[in-house]
Amino acid sequence: RRPVLIDTDTASDDAVALIMALRSPAVEVVAITIVAGNVPVEQGARNALYTAELCGSDVPVYVGASKPIVRDLESAEWFHGLDGLGDHGYAPARRTPETMHAVDAIIAAAHQHPGLEVITLGPLTNLALALHRDPSIVSRISRCVVMGGAPCCEGNVTPAAEFNIWVDPEAARMVFASGLPIEMIGWQLSRDEAVLSADDIARILAIGTPLASFAIQSNSVAAGAYEEQTGEPGISLPDPIAMAVLLEPGLSLSASSHAVQIETISPLTRGMTVVDKLNVSGDQRNASVWAASGRAEICWKLDVPGWKAALE
Ligand code: BDR
Ligand code: CA
């Protein structure tokens, strides 16, 4: 089984992604590391432990950064609920997090598990700090799937930026420039026909297991926020889409590799993922702007029926 480390700011869609990975026979989740994002880091850890317990998993959970590298945390309880899981009063998990810090856990896992695959479902703070502390992990990580960014420039926090990158753009900049083999799953992939419709939701509930009902119920506040934003019912699940591509790379139907820069200065475009589709970064005249950029494989098109089937 492929070793995988999941870095997450566990709220409602993160929880569904955790369930997918913990149930998959294709991967062994060696660690879950928690970062501040949707909810404060302690709440994220509680949510991950609760979700792992529902899956019957004793995967170790490590608490990481409680705030972005240079900014204050701006969380998203309005979208996920005060507890991040739709405020249904889930009982506390029996286990507590490990004592090792998440940044150390990422470094340790990269050294212990050859070919480790990493997937990030929240701001990139923990991974940036791990790379800063031990840059040798770059060559030990075989894949780094990042749920983040808005390569088509349709953000969900601002017109330019997606939440995970916007919350900690300095961390994102470090990760994208690190040389890691990044696969970027932008927010736009979770829109349009990839949104779970009322029929999709009914099909999942019909599975009739506690996990299936938790997956839908924990996203109730997110569903309300989605309807408020778009005027249509549905559940948009960016993190589970990233997890589906990690588990089944064939679900990415069209991808291409480009230089990517993260905007960290302008308030208007903070956290924007600037993708060099036309390779202007290859032109020496642009060298000062693009010098610090790394490359990412950007997924442009998702196998939507395949993604929805991956939820069952
Ligand atoms: C991302 O932000 C959070 O709301 C989700 O969990 C996802 O990781 C989407 O922009
Ligand atoms: Ca997330």
Image (tube, helix red, strand yellow):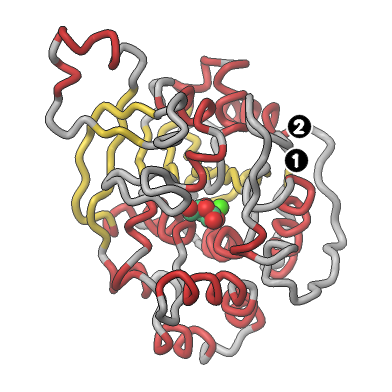
Identify the residue position indicated by label 1 in the image: 63
The numbered disc on residue 101 is 2
User: Is the residue 105 above or below the residue 10 in the image?
Assistant: above
Instruction: Farthest residue to the front: give it.
Output: 268
Mark 1 is on which residue type?
Answer: Val
Helix, strand or loop status at disc 2: loop
Residue 234: x percent and y percent? 44, 78
Residue 199: x percent and y percent? 40, 89
**Mark 2 burial class by Cα count in 10 Å: few <14, some 14-19, many 20+:** some
Question: From mark 2 to mark 1, how far is it between C-alphas?
Answer: 6 Å
User: Is the residue 186 above or below the residue 283 in the image?
Assistant: below
**Mark 1 burial class by Cα count in 10 Å: few <14, some 14-19, many 20+:** many
The numbered disc on residue 151 is none
- Asked whether mark 2 lies closer than 8 Å to ligand 2, one says no
Residues at marks 2 and 1 touching, judged by CB atoms closer than 8 Å: yes
Residue 215: x percent and y percent? 59, 74
User: Is the residue 185 above or below the residue 11 in the image?
Assistant: above
Front-lying residue, 290 or 303:
290
